[in-house]
Amino acid sequence: MRASAQAHANIALVKYWGKRNLEWNLPLAGSLSLTLDGLTTTTTVSWNETGSDRLILDGKEATAGALDKARVVLDEIRRRANIDAFAHIESANNFPTGAGLASSASGLAALTLAAARAANFDCSPEVLSIIARRGSGSACRSIFGGFVEWLPGKQEEGNDSHAVQIFPADYWDLRVVVAVIQDRAKAVNSTTGMLHTAETSPFFQPYIDTVENDITQAKKAIADRKIKALGEIAERSALRMHASMMAADPALIYLQPNSWRVIDRVKELQMDGAECFFSADAGPNVKVFCTPQAEEELTAEIGRIEGVKKIINATVGGDARVI
Ligand code: PMV
């Protein structure tokens, strides 16, 4: 009744920001992401007859909030596998937790796979994706490697809302240079931020209305391996998401002055011909996507920017896997 699994973080190229159902954790629209090798969670789960659920995260007893998220996944596995046991979870990230680097995505995907395997619960990756989604929306995408689409689904309880792989990890060798601006946990978590944006931002629905078209266009750009076209879509998706947050009342501002320094520099480097583009999530860190040829220079250029504490280099990652 014990198993270990590894999953990678993913960064959305077309962003998920808004829920149609909180209980089942269902999105209002689809999203599209790239799974990253280099930002990895390793999780071991053992199911025990006695005790209580416990989560050790990066060597420390996790907060009640993190345990609650994990419990949503554990309850779903208990129900589906028909077991009545408590989970002891040990999880470690090789990158900063909760700082807009998608640690909840890799964490809940690794937990889902490890908990399912430890319970001897055999199911398809799509079902794993549905279970992971209950814990954290973006986690449903981390079950798959490469280029991944999260289908929003239509069903009330979301049995059709899971991720699918659109291209495998080796389809296109993209690199990601993560500019770590802040490695502390974020002040407003994504669920709270999404609900607040939906309730108070006049730009929320207009953002949602852009998503479907962006996904169609992004899939074409990926199919054609056109980084410039993909970059235009990914940058506007990120900025429109941030614009919808900033128009909330009170404003929700995740990007910091140092984030903008990185974004500015990416725009300058693009003008000089560098094949790269940026993205940013619910935190100040900026992710720069580029070709392998551009990676070295970009890493050096971005590393020099004031306020960039650290650089993490990533390549395209594979599926979540049992280890
Ligand atoms: O999966 P959550 O609830 O942590 O939300 C993720 C939201 C963003 O990272 C901002 C966008 C995305 O699609 O990953």
Image (cartoon, rainbow, N blue to C red):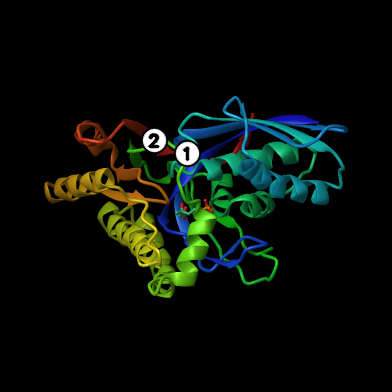
Residue that sits furthest to the left in the current view: 272
Q: Picture coordinates of residue 1 (x, y %)?
A: 81, 31
State the residue at coordinates (39%, 62%): 245
Q: Are marks 2 and 1 in contact (CB under 8 Å)?
A: yes
* Amino acid type at mark 1: Gly
Q: Residue furthest top?
A: 59
| Residue 156 coordinates in the image, percent (x, y) | 68, 71
Which residue is drawn at the image coordinates 62% and 72% (left, top)? 154
Q: Is residue 30 visible?
A: no
Left or right relative to 145: residue 83:
right
Q: Nearer the viewer, mark 2 or mark 1?
A: 2
Secondary structure of the residue carrying tag 1 is: loop
How crowded is the residue under tag 2: few (<14 C-alpha within 10 Å), some, or many (20+)?
some
Please give left or right for residue 160 compared with residue 196 in the image: right
Structural distance between the alpha carbons of marks 2 and 1: 8 Å
* Residue at (52% x, 44% y) in the render: 145
- Image position of 7 with respect to 250: above or below: above
At label 2, the amino acid type is Ala
Count of numbered labels shown in the rendering = 2
Q: Which residue is mark 1?
A: 317
- The residue that disc 2 covers is 314
- Residue 139 appears in view: yes
Residue 191, numbered circle = none
